[in-house]
Image: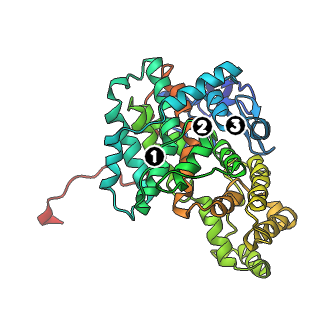
Amino acid sequence: MASLTVDSKDPIELPVHAASVGPDVIDVSELTNQGYFTYDPGFVSTASCNSNITYIDGDEGILLHCGYPIEQLAERSDFLELCYLLLNGELPSATEKDDFVGEIRRHSKVDDQLRNFFTGFRRDAHPMAMMCGVVGALAAFYHNSLDITDASHRRDTAHRLIAKMPILAAMSRRHALGLPFIDPRDDLGYAGNFLHMMFAPADGDYEVNPVLARAFDRIFLLHADHEQNASTSTVRLAGSTGANPYACIAAGIAALWGPAHGGANEAVLNMLAEIGTPENIGKFVKRAKDPDDPFRIMGFGHRVYKNYDPRARVMQQTCREVLDELGVENDPTLQMAQQLERIALEDEYFVDRRLYPNVDFYSGIILRAIGIPEDMFTVIFTTGRTPGWIAHWCEMVAVPYKIGRPRQLYTGASRRDFVPIEKR
């Protein structure tokens, strides 16, 4: 138990809940009955739920999915196996994985009427706007399986969203280019099919590069879940109202669209373009240290990580593999990224502030090298994050839960009487 004393009154006893890993939490839910709220802008010290899915130790640079380190998963597993893990809490057997992959493949078709939705979007519409619309519209196509209390409905919805998200993502790009949609192929894996649906010509004749497919699988895997971030918390908050899962995931997509969340890798490329050449790095690093200069080194630091983001190491290696495969030698963008990384790990200014490279630092370089346009970067993030969103939604609605209702510190006018307009 913890005790809280306010204004010399009798202490208020607060239960302490033990975590399996990481810090314990003080339960303040009964403070309202004592006439108090806690004040925590940005929820930096507030646990809004309990979860068995993902654990982050930001000080040590640790990311675990159901107990498994992200480094091991990135090296030995693949995206769909991680999807199974997030949804079920355990790694699958060989048979279970085959069945799961088969389920995802079975749902990898898009209704012709849903395809027609894209014709209503302008060609120059942002692909994230299209994704918000078409994912929310899925509820109109699967309205007979929206009973959130039915475990089989929840399972089918999770499989359906994981299966359809890369198809819808590719469709948003092809619509913008005025190209015909390409159906997925049964002989390709999840990431390979995405590349096929993105880049195949109209006749569908496209050979998937296995190195690029593996890189994309890692990108999806590294973004699959990251605990109670802004978009995942949005999905949970929307879900706490009893809203259908497609509406909840669409809400998560809208939250991810924000440049402070899903757009960070694009911001890294914009920063590197502004720096221009490796010779200019020193000047821009000096600007970043100047508190009166608005310039910031993008892709460094993280709301949670105060150490090296474990996903960044994997992404760095993947970046080198992709550039080697594509024959991109002495890429100036990569040179600048590597030099910035060295500075950040050695410069007292960055070390003291614990500003280490994060996952966004290299992912934009990879995506650009493969040929993904910058306005699709957040769509790629959306595709990768979908299993995390739907796993958290399933976890929440499977047990009794409360509707989310944050409180506030009111600082407006106190009570006053209305004055008729002629007397004002």
Mark 2 is surrounded, within 10 Å at the Cα level, by few (under 14), some (14 to 19) or many (20 or more) other residues, namely few
Residue carrying label 1: 168
Farthest residue, direction left: 422
Q: Nearer the viewer, mark 3 or mark 2?
A: 2
Amino acid at pointer 2? Asp
Q: Residue at x 55, y 45 (%)?
A: 383
Q: Secondary structure at mark 1?
A: helix
Residue 85, compared with residue 163, is above or below; it is: above
SS of the residue under disc 2: loop
The spot of residue 362 in percent (x, y) is: 71, 59
**Residue at which label 2 appears:** 187
Residue 404, relative to residue 150: is it above or below? Answer: below
Q: What amino acid type should be assigned to the residue bearing mark 3?
A: Asp
Mark number displayed over residue 78:
3
**Can residue 102 be seen?**
yes
First of labels 2, 1 by sequence position: 1
Other residues around mark 3 within 10 Å, as few (<14) / some (14–19) / many (≥20): some
| Front position in the image: 399 or 409 | 399
Q: Tag 1: Cα neighbours inside 10 Å, few (<14), some, or many (≥20)?
A: many
Toward the right, the furthest residue is 346
